Structures are given as C-alpha cells and as structure tokens.
C-alpha cells in the first residue's frame, strides 16, 4: 500500500514538472479552520500525498500553502492535527500534521491555501515551536 502511494507521489511530481500549475482564485481555500488536538487522529487520519510549499504565521492563524494531484481539489478533506503531546524543551514544542483525503484521480497539480486558528495550541509561557510534518522549518508561535 505504501509503495503504491510512493509511486503515485513520484508520478505526481513528474507531472508537475511537465504540466502547467494553475494559480487562480478558484484554487484558494483561504478560510479558517480549527486545529484538531488528538493523538488518535494524528496517527490515523488520511495521509494522501501532498507537498507543503509555504507556511505563514500571523497572530493566531497559520496559513498553509500546499499542492497535490487531482481534478480541482473541491472534494479534498483537509485537517491540521496536533499530536496532543507537548515536548519539554525551551521553548516547548508541538508536533502537527496536515492531513489530506484526496480521492480525485485526475492528472492536474493543484495548489491551495488554507488557514487554521491555532490559538488552542498555546501552552504555559508565551511561545511554542510548531513542528509540521513534511515542512522543513519549525514555526515559532509567540502569543
């Protein structure tokens, strides 16, 4: 199962290099969702292939720009899930994952943005580091 997802992911990357990336207003999902704090969902929620292109933190909102293969992305189910564990460090850290359920079987490579209210991720003190799976940089959330 994992090898078929890996092959599909490589296939999508290849297509992205030979196809046009459509970047218009129809591909934007810029609305606010709540972050989900659940160890169970962190481990079991769908994990269809996606690429996180950019993450921007503004106040209590985390905007994530990401891409995946599909037809339009209209049927995608997207969730930001926290592992419900606070890592003891300075500053403390939290692990998150962007979950994507994508059942679209088209060859287009679609980019979307979505923002999440992350105020529920605050811990004692005034800052926390956010580690997002498949994103190379940590995000320092200061509140």
Image (cartoon, rainbow, N blue to C red):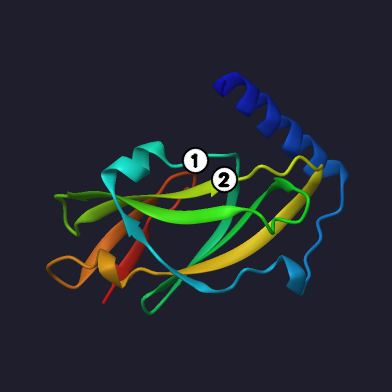
Quarter of the view holding residue 10:
top right
Residue 83 x %, y %: 29, 47
Mark 1 to mark 2 CA distance (whole Å): 5 Å
**Residue 141 relative to residue 71: left or right:** left
Looking at the image, which residue is at 27% across and 53% down?
94
Mark 2 surroundings: few (<14), some (14-19) or many (≥20) residues within 10 A? some
**Residue 99 relative to residue 96: left or right:** right
Quadrant location of the C terminus?
Answer: bottom left
Residues tagged 1 and 2 counted as in contact (Cβ below 8 A)? yes
Which numbered circle lies on residue 46?
Answer: 1
Q: Earlier in the sequence, mark 1 or mark 2?
A: 1
Quadrant location of the N terminus?
Answer: top right
Mark 1 surroundings: few (<14), some (14-19) or many (≥20) residues within 10 A? some
**Residue 74 relative to residue 97: left or right:** right
Looking at the image, which residue is at 38% across and 52% down?
81
Residue topped by disc 2: 101
């Amino acid at each position: 199962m994992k090898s078929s997802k890996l092959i599909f992911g490589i296939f999508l990357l290849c297509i992205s290099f030979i196809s046009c990336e459509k970047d218009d207003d129809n591909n934007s999902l810029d609305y606010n969702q709540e972050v989900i704090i659940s160890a169970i969902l962190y481990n079991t929620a769908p994990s269809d292939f996606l690429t996180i292109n950019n993450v921007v933190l503004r106040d209590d909102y985390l905007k994530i720009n990401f891409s995946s293969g599909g037809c339009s992305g209209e049927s995608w189910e997207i969730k930001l899930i926290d592992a419900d564990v606070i890592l003891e460090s300075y500053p403390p850290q939290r692990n998150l994952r962007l979950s994507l359920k994508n059942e679209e079987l088209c060859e287009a490579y679609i980019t979307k943005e979505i923002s999440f209210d992350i105020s529920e991720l605050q811990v004692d003190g005034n800052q926390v580091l956010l580690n997002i799976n498949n994103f190379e940089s940590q995000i320092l959330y200061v509140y």
